[in-house]
Image (tube, rainbow, N blue to C red):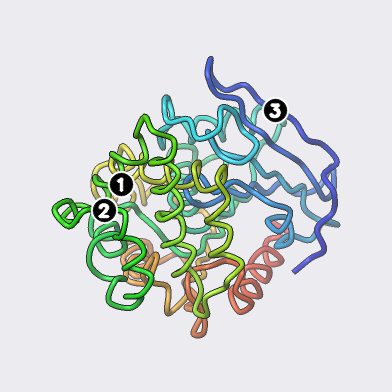
Amino acid sequence: MYTPEEPFQTGFLKVSDLHTLYYEQSGKKDGKPVVFLHGGPGGGTSATDRTYFDPQVYRIVLLDQRGSGKSTPSAELKDNTTWDLVNDIELLREELKIDKWVVFGGSWGSTLSLAYAQTHPSRVKALILRGIFLLRRSELDFFYQNGASHLFPEAWDDFVAPIPESERGDMMQAYHARLNSEEEGVRLEAAKAWSKWEMSTSKLQVDPADVAKAAEDDWANAFARIENHFFVNAGWMRDGQLLEKQGIDKIRGIPTVIAQGRYDVVCPITTAWALKKVFPEAELTIVPDAGHSAREKPTQKILCAFADRFKDL
């Protein structure tokens, strides 16, 4: 990992009457542009997200998506869809006067990267993806209903605890009701439990620091509310839309590399495999000793190598 340098510019971009996005640029001012698309949705960015890229080569652009991180209003669900975010990325590219850039995204960031690339293929020099997530119902059911629960039963018990047994047949909808409750205490209890479930399952070896992050009120509220909002609405996409031939054909000429943890239970490898089958031009690297998180050392190493590969693109 490269040492994160302080941004040479931070700013706010008003993208609608309601939403204003935080963004930053670091690295080389006239370097090769790369945009980092964070996960969640709702996760926000941090200084660590700069460290995959050589700051002597790359002009590193980070943005907090609608309702996330330093963007305002926090945890806002109105006018917050996949296609709003795709449009926001393009608005930021135009604001920064960038012609084309490398697009880097993991987990939900991989979903957004693919949606953006299929919408604006002429603006993408390369795709660096990790932990492929395509927001299909089968993926959501595995993680939030019946699948990952078999591997992390103790964490699952904590996840279902706020939900009465009579409502556990649809955990996403049950959480949706609580995350949008008029009572702040109900919202926060649900947000922390939702976030803790993901933080408890993201790494091959559970990291207590990740689990502790789920107890932070503001972060958990934005993370859980926005994730759940996107998931109960199926990302405003057809099921499997990002795998459809018409979309894949638009990006076949874009150099694409994928890092996928073998033991990823948040976004299981079957999804990356489904993408590879319809998009054989993409290079899939299976990380044999990693789970979901981009911050596991074996995955970090591969992602840095991917970014280094495109230095001369």
Q: Nearer the viewer, mark 2 or mark 1?
A: 2
Q: Amino acid at mark 1?
A: Tyr
Q: Amino acid at mark 2?
A: Ile
* Residue 268, x across and y down, in percent: 36, 70
* Residue 230, x across and y down, in percent: 36, 41
Q: CA distance from mark 2 to mark 1?
A: 8 Å
Question: Residue at left 37%, top 50%?
Answer: 249
Quadrant location of residue 301?
bottom right
Q: Nearer the viewer, mark 3 or mark 2?
A: 2
Q: Tell me the tag on residue 175.
A: 1
* Residue 163, x across and y down, in percent: 26, 53
Q: CA distance from mark 3 to mark 1?
A: 31 Å
Question: Residue at left 51%, top 64%?
Answer: 130
Q: Is residue 301 left or right of residue 144?
A: right
Question: Residue at left 55%, top 33%?
Answer: 74
Residue 289 vertical placement versus 247 (above, below)? below
Q: CA distance from mark 3 to mark 2?
A: 38 Å
2 and 1 marks in contact (CB < 8 Å): yes
Mark 3 or mark 2, earlier in chain: 3
Q: Amino acid at mark 3?
A: Phe
The local crowd at label 2, few if under 14, some if 14 to 19, many if 20 or more residues have their Cα within 10 Å, is some
**Residue at image mark 2:** 163
